Amino acid sequence: MLKLSPENFNKARNFIFTNGDEINHALFRYHFDDGDADAFMAVLAKYQHENGGFGGLSDEFEYQGPCLKCTEIAIRYILGLDEKPSGDHIVIRRMMAYLLDHYIPEIGNWGEPFVPEINEDVHCSWSRYRGATPDAMADDEERIKRYDPNEKVCFAAFVTHYSEIVPQELHDEIIKYPIQHILRYWDKDSPEYCVGSVYDFEYFQWFVPCLKNKNIADKLTVILQQNPTAFWELDFTKSDTDYVHLPCISPKNIVYPVVKDLADAALTFRIKQQRDNGKWPLGWSYGDSEGMRRLEAKSDVMRTVNMLVLLKKSGRILSIMM
């Protein structure tokens, strides 16, 4: 099994510390230097605004104010920690207040994760405010059927992971819709089965492990394991020049047991894609303008840190020489 060499690990480290910002430095230090969750959370707190939302964490727009999209990225960081902060942590409590304030009971979900101000500055075309919050839905059946997990079910994951600081009735309502949506529309044996998107599939992999009810979590895991290859590009070479999703998941992922060989092969391919300067390439371009190049440069760093973390969790890094 191919593993990242110490030399190539250090190339990646140098790339991150030469080109990265404070949060990416902190994420690297947490996973590869000291494992100090408190130190990482202290850095993450610098990106939290007074209303509890986060800003400045996205590589797809330059707007620095609070929005759900950057808060989603903060959730990704927190749920990726080996030892997560308790619900009493001030960052967690402020974050939860922000999320609950933006929850829309009439749709059983959150609205779009972008704010109008994003459109006023440099941003990628796919990361913009669309004003697309759905109208209120008539009943639970409609909310379940039309549930949109993309960029939103991670908020439900956060709510259920920190359920002790959420009113019980509200918690149960929030998680009901994604649970029922998976049961009815993702199970191949259900008469209402309907193939979702790769984004929905990836976000559900965040949500299910956070559920406290093991029986429900196990049932949803089996459903998500039914046909995972339907959502991935299996011709890995296409990632050299195109935006595709490869089955690059760690052994801790809930669908890994049914795609172990494929996931291992995808990670081997990714290891070989590393550039001489240490980064993992995007494979395509954000754009030619100066602003787009700035965003892409930030993306390069985030992608490289995340790749190192994935390789570590997968046991794919040889002894590290710091």
Image (cartoon, rainbow, N blue to C red):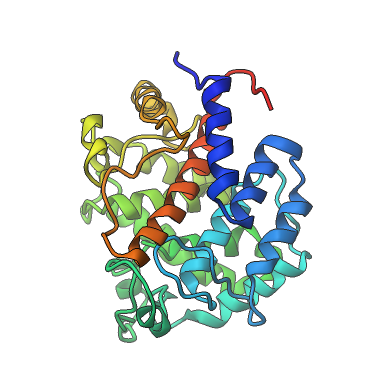
13, 1: nearer the viewer = 13
- In the image, what residue occupies the spot 43% across and 66% down? 152
Residue sitting farthest toward the top: 1
Quadrant showing the N terminus: top left
Note whether 316 is above or below 167 in the view shown: above
114 above or below 299? below
- Foreground residue, 14 or 218? 14
Reply above or below: 285 against 99.
above
Residue 88 rendering spot, x and y as whole percentages: 78, 65
Q: Residue at x 58, y 36 (%)?
A: 13
Q: Quadrant of residue 34?
A: top right
Give x and y (percent) for residue 68.
49, 72
Q: Quadrant of the C terminus?
A: top right
- Please state which of residues 250 and 64 is positioned toward the viewer in this rendering: 64
Q: Is residue 82 above or below residue 322?
A: below
Is 93 situated left or right of 55 in this image?
A: right
Q: Is residue 151 visible?
A: yes
The structure residue drawn at horizontal position 30% and vertical position 47%, both measured from the top left corner, is 187
Residue 228 percent across, percent down from the top left: 31, 38
115 left or right, relative to 146:
right
* Residue 175 located left or right of residue 52: left
Res. 211 in view: no
Q: How many marks?
A: 0
Provide residue 227's location: percent of width, then percent of height.
28, 37
**Residue 236 relative to residue 13: left or right:** left
